[in-house]
Image (cartoon, rainbow, N blue to C red):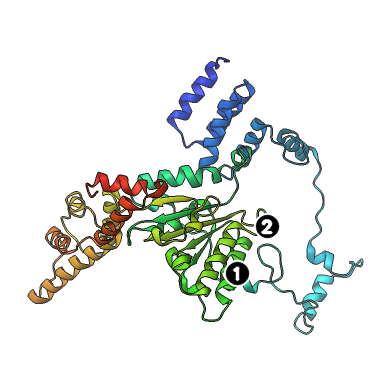
Amino acid sequence: MLAESPLIQSLRTAVAAAPDDVPLRLHLAALLLDAGHGDAAVAEVAVALQRAPGDVEARRLMARALGVPTQEGAPAQEVASAQEVAPAQEVVPAQEADSAPARPGFDWKAAQDQVGDVLPPRFVEAPLTVDGGGDAGDAAAWDVERPGAVRLADVGGMQEVKERLEAAFLAPLRNPELRRVYGKSLRGGLLLYGPPGCGKTFIARAVAGELGAAFLSVSVNDVLDMWIGNSERNMHEIFRTARRQAPCVVFLDELDALGGKRSRSQSSGMRNTVNQLLTELDGVDAGANEGVFVLAATNVPWDVDIALRRPGRLDRTLLVLPPDGPAREAILRYHLRDRPIENVDLGKLVKATDGLSGADLAHLCEAAAERALLDSARTGTVRLIGMKDLLAAAQQVLPSTEPWFASARNVAMYANDGGMYDDLVAHLKKKRKL
């Protein structure tokens, strides 16, 4: 193994002191590559791409380190040098190309401006969709949200959930060069399950924000229709819209209603809807779902059709539990931020709310505010919300997750075929509920 030079060692120390300095890390990677340390250079560039996925220099350096051809088989270094040497070609604006040839001494643009209010436009063009097609009606029929500001960093606590999302779902998608090397397809499916009110929908939006992807939320009323065949058509149009808007995250809320077990369904229309969902998840053509990421959420995964959870569809499962201590503190801070409070000990309040879901915590803050409001109305003196109000509300609010865990315990004990609910079993044993 080649020894590293003192300069490289010094740069490693500097990078360790400033891990978010992408240019410094790329400089270290370039020196490592020139010194013959190819594997070390790839590792440094991969970290840089995680912090700055769109960095052109990082992508060029990764292609050079991996020997990946960029344009027509030419290495990245040769392409870059060719672009620097080649003279810039003159680009003719589209409006000028569409107009008549200019005559010497005649200003066509001024003439068009003069008659613009009199003559109608020569061409009426339909708006183009994202993929360049002319049919924009279907894409506009569904409420596709553009990438929002919600990121995983905005999800309070839940460090284990974030790490599993990063390892199984996000890390391969942030590094397209490494993904190509390892043959990772740019598609995926993830099933979020757990008790109600624990933030599954919020996590799905955060994943869309991390990917910089559009977000398409789908519920039962978006799909089901009273007329035969319309439900299947709606399901097809949803995925068709997602493919046009790719990269796009399709969030299937309450999957047990959209993809329930066909053996239990008495309606042929519902069975056909599940069949259509299976077809869309597979993609009729090879690569049809490239760039379409499917996230689904359910409170009862044991009621979901088993075919939806086979490899290639919703093959990854993530248990979303009630918020842990840091998450409860973040949620309480959020719901108390605009309320008149005094002398609130969040540490004590967090310990008193163990087992409450995010929805329970929001209700707790609402109940404490009501208690202070009624007291102020009775006495005629306005007072602030204190720890006494919050602790009294905490004693009154019962965990809404307990009935769910009571049902889940039976599944974990008697229906954990193939280790499908091992994470649930581990949690119940940790809480001594199994």
**Which residue is identified by label 2?**
285
Residue 198 quadrant: bottom left
Residue at the far bottom: name it: 118
Could you tell whether 352 is left or right of 45 in the image?
left
Q: Nearer the viewer, residue 171 or 84?
A: 171
**Of the residues shown, which amino acid type is indicated by label 1?**
Glu
Q: Residue at x 64, y 74 (%)?
A: 137
Residue 187's x, y, as percent?
Answer: 57, 51
- Separation of disc 2 and disc 1 at Cα? 16 Å
Residue 227's x, y, as percent?
Answer: 55, 81
Q: Nearer the viewer, residue 365 or 276?
A: 276
Q: Secondary structure at mark 1?
A: helix
Looking at the image, is 38 positioned above or below residue 273?
A: above
Q: Mark 2–mark 1 contact, CB under 8 Å?
A: no
Q: Which mark is residue 237?
A: 1
**Of the residues shown, which amino acid type is indicated by label 2?**
Asp
Q: How many marks do you count on the picture?
A: 2
Give neighbour class at mark 2: few <14, some 14-19, many 20+ (Cα, 10 Å): few
Q: Secondary structure at mark 2?
A: loop
Could you tell whether 13 is left or right of 49 in the image?
left
Give neighbour class at mark 1: few <14, some 14-19, many 20+ (Cα, 10 Å): some
Residue 282's x, y, as percent?
Answer: 59, 57
The quadrant of the rendering that contains the N terminus is top right
Could you tell whether 160 is left or right of 383 in the image?
right
Q: Which mark is residue 187?
A: none
Q: Residue at x 26, y 52 (%)?
A: 329
Looking at the image, is 270 positioned above or below residue 8?
A: below
Could you tell whether 79 is left or right of 216 in the image?
right
Q: Is residue 150 visible?
A: no
Residue mark closest to the camera, 2 vs 1: 2
In primary-sequence order, the first of circles 2 and 1 is 1
